[in-house]
């Protein structure tokens, strides 16, 4: 029976641990911090394999709204017809196109879902080509055209209303150091659509983490791994912060690959060429997070302040030159207990972002009526790195862009979950599919270990 | 580096072997490696053991990529517990930095700020005021008031030293050495003379005798240290260094190629020229081309540099031979072009170095 240690407490680590435990491994999970409920979808295959239930995926209703210049709000609902009604108030033309747009995008998202439900495809394999062919001519054309496209151009193709385009375009740039006119942001837009119903372009919140924690079979240890022990070129266990040494035949790390391979493994075991490539994996955090408690309902469940694609692009322009956006893109969601979480983008990692919190609360205050915050917590990317373990504040560990996706995630040499050190394996947000797809990379990694 | 300071390199060559020659070897790449993990970094990069080098010791070593193929070769001088200087033929700063990730060490390129002069030949010690320095050692000293580091190293296979000096003092040092050496027949020497000397000494030259792995266009152009007769520099006892796994595997199965000395037989050569009515012709300078070597109908390998040794009165070459033909004494044939026609002259595998004087180490 293999002794296996899984490092990290996120969905990927827990899924990998469960799959391996069921495959006959003796598994211990070592987490330094309990992961908070994760945003994102989990492939049905993973849920079935671990018999996770009842899975609850939640979207706010409406899933997003945005203030209109003339007053009132544009509201987008799960119900496509209801969204059409709301869009009609700003643009009858756009309202007319909405159902078809949703259908076309959903078809591509379903394709990505099927790709994400398996280990990264081999670009040379006929199976991959066959699967893409199943999209049909128009679907395949859409896919090849849209993946490398700037999200702004995709939306300009379909719609005329700035507020609608800003609200949708924001999905293409969330958590990436790119603006809506950067190439490849349409892929990001589709990525955030994955797992959501037709017409919903934001990822859900799920209870998968809680369900995973309730599962038996796996020993959980709350401590930190200082380094991964290697002897004669093979992984033999881990050394903990408290000095304890744990032996293992297999170590699975869901921590970011650069940290795993460059910091946790002693220098000299890896090909320096790989170490160099790892140093160039992009992982820039771009968003600050504010959590606050309001004394009453703000009058919305989800609100985006990104009134146009130009607005988003200007916000990015500041960040491109290393500054905090003078007018950042904000997106706030609020639950029934009036707990609000706000994404503030762009905030470059190196910036201290002083006074940003006050400015953001001032702007939001114009939209939440009589509500007052009773408690606030502002975390810049640097603080998110410290408290959440996100490298440079990047929640996806490696930015998800076309060149760091699929069989190139995070690097072609690592994409198969096997690190170039016998006994060491990688999963987590930086591994395919990662980036907000909860548990899938852990599932694929565990299957690779089990040789399935 | 100058090819020659005179119309012909011959006097420069004879100065190396019978008096003293001064060579400007400043074009070497030089790196200062300092910090707590300095020894650890170099230990990881090169094939030899560095951690057990003593302060004041110098070591020659190649270093490899992860596939165990030679990237470059040079010397490492331990200047202090936490300070080394590495010399290289090619730029290696990025490679050192890539290997230094996670280590507490700084790597500084001192190629421009540090000059190097090689004083080589039997009179070199007396010119340096009878300096007492063992083979492959380095020490701080002054020469006529100029602070220098002197190492007992070189590329001639003779008694000789290399002097390391801040570039601002380099010209003054050159002049001082010429002045001090003139009574002993010192001569400035260039690459043509050095080429003959280093072939006699059996020392390989990058880009000539081997293709560094980084420049190889196809795998078969690369060489492992074993294939370059550098097995003595590969310390597989070290737990890790770049290329260790590949080299351990190669050591277990034995290298396919060997890098050997070849002597071309005079009588065979003379006969080839006599057949066309000519006296035997010898190359005026060392050559650096690939020349096929045969064993009967098969090609056993190829020579990569060779030339006439004026001192030994022998026509010698450095060659890569497939292992089964590489044993000393093996009789082979080497291609020689005589009056525009390709002929084969008899040749024999011999032990390197061709020339190995007692004074080199003594």
Image (cartoon, grey):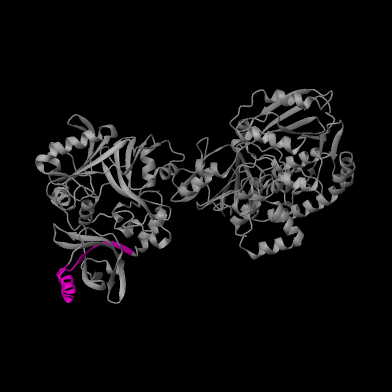
Q: Nearer the viewer, residue B15 or B200?
A: B15
Question: How many numbered markers are drawn?
Answer: 0
Q: Does residue A288 appear in the picture of this structure?
A: yes
- Tell me: B256 left or right of A112: left
Q: Is residue B262 found inside the magenta-colored segment of the image?
A: yes
Q: Position of residue B129 (x, y in %)?
A: 13, 36
Q: Position of residue A59 (x, y in %)?
A: 80, 41
Q: Is residue A28 found inside the magenta-colored segment of the image?
A: no
Please report the bounds of the magenta region as a residue range. B257-280
Q: Position of residue A55 (x, y in %)?
A: 77, 46
Q: Position of residue A380 (x, y in %)?
A: 64, 30
Q: Does residue A437 appear in the picture of this structure?
A: no
Residue B135 drawn above or below residue A289: below
Q: Residue at x 61, y 46 (%)?
A: A430
- Tell me: A19 left or right of B199: right
Q: Nearer the viewer, residue A256 or B271?
A: B271
Residue B103 drawn above or below residue B259: above
- Residue extending furthest front? B7
Residue B123 drawn above or below residue B201: above
């Amino acid at each position: 029976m293999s002794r296996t240690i899984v490092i990290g407490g996120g969905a990927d680590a827990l899924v990998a641990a469960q799959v391996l435990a069921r495959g006959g491994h003796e598994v211990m999970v070592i987490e330094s911090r309990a992961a908070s409920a994760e945003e994102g979808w989990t492939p049905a295959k993973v849920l079935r394999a671990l018999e996770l239930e009842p899975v609850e995926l939640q979207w706010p209703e409406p899933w997003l709204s945005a203030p209109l210049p003339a007053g009132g709000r544009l509201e987008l609902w799960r119900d496509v017809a209801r969204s059409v009604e709301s869009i009609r108030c700003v643009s009858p033309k756009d309202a007319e196109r909405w159902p078809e747009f949703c259908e076309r995008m959903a078809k591509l998202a379903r394709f990505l879902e099927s790709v994400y439900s398996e280990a990264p495809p081999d670009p040379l394999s006929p199976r991959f080509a066959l699967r893409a062919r199943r999209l049909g001519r128009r679907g395949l054309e859409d896919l090849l055209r849209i993946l490398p496209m700037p999200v702004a151009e995709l939306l300009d193709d379909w719609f005329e209303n700035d507020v609608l385009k800003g609200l949708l375009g924001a999905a293409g740039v969330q958590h990436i150091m790119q603006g809506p006119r950067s190439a490849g942001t349409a892929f990001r837009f589709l990525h955030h659509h994955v797992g959501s119903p037709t017409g919903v372009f934001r990822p859900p919140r799920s209870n998968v983490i809680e369900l995973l924690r309730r599962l038996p079979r796996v020993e959980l240890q709350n401590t930190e791994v200082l380094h991964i022990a290697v002897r004669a070129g093979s992984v033999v266990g881990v050394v903990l912060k408290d000095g304890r040494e744990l032996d293992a035949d297999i170590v699975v790390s869901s921590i970011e690959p650069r940290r795993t391979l460059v910091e946790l493994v002693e220098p000299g075991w890896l090909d320096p060429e790989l170490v160099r490539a790892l140093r160039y994996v992009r992982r820039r955090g771009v968003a600050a997070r504010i959590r606050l408690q309001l004394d009453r309902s703000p009058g919305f469940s989800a609100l985006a302040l990104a009134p146009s694609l130009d607005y988003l692009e200007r916000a990015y322009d500041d960040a491109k030159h290393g500054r905090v956006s003078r007018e950042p893109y904000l997106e706030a969601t609020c639950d029934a207990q009036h707990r609000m979480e706000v994404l503030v983008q762009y905030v470059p990692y190196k910036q201290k972002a002083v006074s940003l919190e006050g400015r953001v609360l001032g702007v939001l205050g114009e939209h939440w009526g009589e509500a007052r915050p009773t408690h606030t917590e502002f975390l810049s990317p640097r603080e998110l790195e410290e408290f959440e373990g996100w490298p440079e504040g990047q929640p996806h560990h490696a930015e998800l862009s076309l060149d760091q996706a699929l069989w190139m995630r995070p690097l072609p040499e690592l994409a198969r979950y096997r690190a170039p050190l016998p006994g060491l394996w990688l999963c987590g947000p930086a591994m395919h599919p990662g980036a907000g797809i909860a548990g899938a990379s852990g599932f694929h990694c565990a299957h690779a270990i089990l040789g399935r | 580096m100058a090819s020659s300071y005179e119309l012909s390199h011959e006097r420069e060559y004879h100065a190396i072997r019978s008096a003293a020659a001064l060579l400007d070897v400043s074009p070497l790449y030089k790196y200062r490696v300092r910090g707590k993990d300095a020894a650890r970094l170099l230990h990881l990069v090169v094939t030899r053991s560095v951690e057990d080098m003593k302060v004041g010791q110098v070591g020659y070593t190649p270093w490899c990529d992860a596939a165990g193929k030679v990237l470059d070769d040079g010397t490492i001088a331990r200047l202090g517990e936490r300070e080394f200087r590495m010399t290289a033929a090619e730029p290696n700063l990025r490679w050192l930095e890539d290997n230094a990730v996670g280590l507490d060490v700084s790597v500084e390129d001192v190629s421009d700020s540090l000059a190097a002069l090689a004083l080589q030949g039997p009179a070199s010690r007396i010119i340096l005021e009878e300096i007492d320095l063992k083979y492959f050692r380095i020490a701080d000293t002054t020469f006529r008031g100029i602070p220098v580091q002197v190492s007992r190293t070189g590329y001639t296979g003779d008694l000789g030293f290399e002097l390391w000096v801040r570039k601002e003092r380099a010209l003054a040092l050159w002049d001082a050495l010429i002045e001090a050496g003139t009574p002993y027949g010192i001569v400035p020497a260039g690459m043509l003379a050095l080429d003959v000397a280093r072939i006699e000494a059996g020392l390989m030259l990058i880009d000539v005798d081997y293709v560094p792995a980084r420049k190889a266009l196809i795998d078969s152009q690369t060489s492992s240290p074993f294939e370059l007769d550098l097995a003595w520099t590969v310390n597989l006892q070290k737990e890790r260094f770049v290329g260790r796994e590949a080299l351990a595997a190669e050591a277990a199965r034995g290298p396919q190629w060997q890098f050997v000395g070849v002597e071309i037989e005079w009588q065979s050569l003379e006969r080839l020229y006599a057949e066309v009515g000519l006296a035997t012709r010898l190359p005026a300078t060392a050559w650096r081309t690939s020349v096929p070597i045969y064993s009967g109908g098969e090609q056993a390998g190829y020579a990569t540099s060779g030339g006439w040794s004026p001192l030994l009165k022998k026509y010698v070459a450095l060659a890569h031979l497939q292992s089964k033909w590489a044993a000393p004494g093996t009789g082979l044939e080497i291609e020689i072009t005589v009056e525009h026609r390709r002929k084969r002259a008899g040749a024999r595998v011999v032990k390197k170095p061709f020339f190995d004087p007692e004074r080199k180490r003594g």
